[in-house]
Image (tube, rainbow, N blue to C red):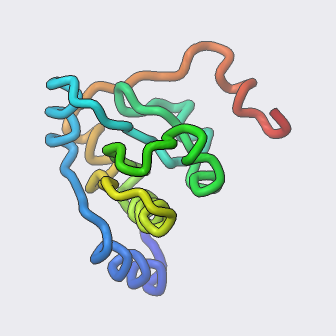
Amino acid sequence: MKHSEAFEKLVADIKSQVREISTEEVMKKLDRKDEFHLIDVREDHEWLDGHARGARHIGRGIMERDIEKLIPDYNAPIVLYCGGGYRSALAAVNIQMMGYTNVLSMAGGIREWRKKGLPEEKPPEGAAAYLAPGK
């Protein structure tokens, strides 16, 4: 996907404030059963199409509003991902500003995950109704 020059510059500036982790390292953490929160920040419809194995969903649009409910521990290890690593970097900076201290953004996002053939899952049947507007 081609992004605007202004958006590319914004993300480049933001990424200097965010630590990234590779898809391989995330998979190793999952295989070792490390304790961390893997959060998909994509839109609801993207989540429904499939997500990294073990991930939970908090859409980028509500991340700052809902993160404390899902992860009340400000020191908990968190890995965020999106489609290509842009939205997750933006979300990471914001939750760092909220006081979260152990936040990583997965470089390359779900596109890199899929390119490497790493395991995905889909939400259970009926999840679309849960994510529907007004729910």
In which quadrant of the rendered image does the C terminus lie? Answer: top right
Q: Position of residue 82 (x, y in %)?
A: 43, 50
Residue in the image at 48% along x and 60% along y = 95
Q: Is residue 110 visible?
A: no
Q: Position of residue 20 (x, y in %)?
A: 24, 59
Q: Residue furthest top?
A: 125
In the image, is 22 to the left or to the right of 71?
Answer: left
Q: Position of residue 100 (x, y in %)?
A: 41, 57
In the image, is 60 to the left or to the right of 133?
Answer: left
Q: Position of residue 7 (x, y in %)?
A: 47, 79
Q: Is residue 5 visible?
A: yes
Residue in the image at 28% along x and 25% along y = 119
Residue in the image at 37% along x and 76% along y = 14
Location of residue 123 with respect to 117 vertically, above or below:
above
Say which of 3 and 32 sits in front.
32
In which quadrant of the rendered image does the N terminus lie? Answer: bottom left
In the image, is 68 to the left or to the right of 52?
Answer: right
Say which of 109 and 5 sits in front.
109
Residue in the image at 47% along x and 33% along y = 56
Location of residue 15 with respect to 106 vertically, above or below:
below
Corner quadrant of residue 51: top left
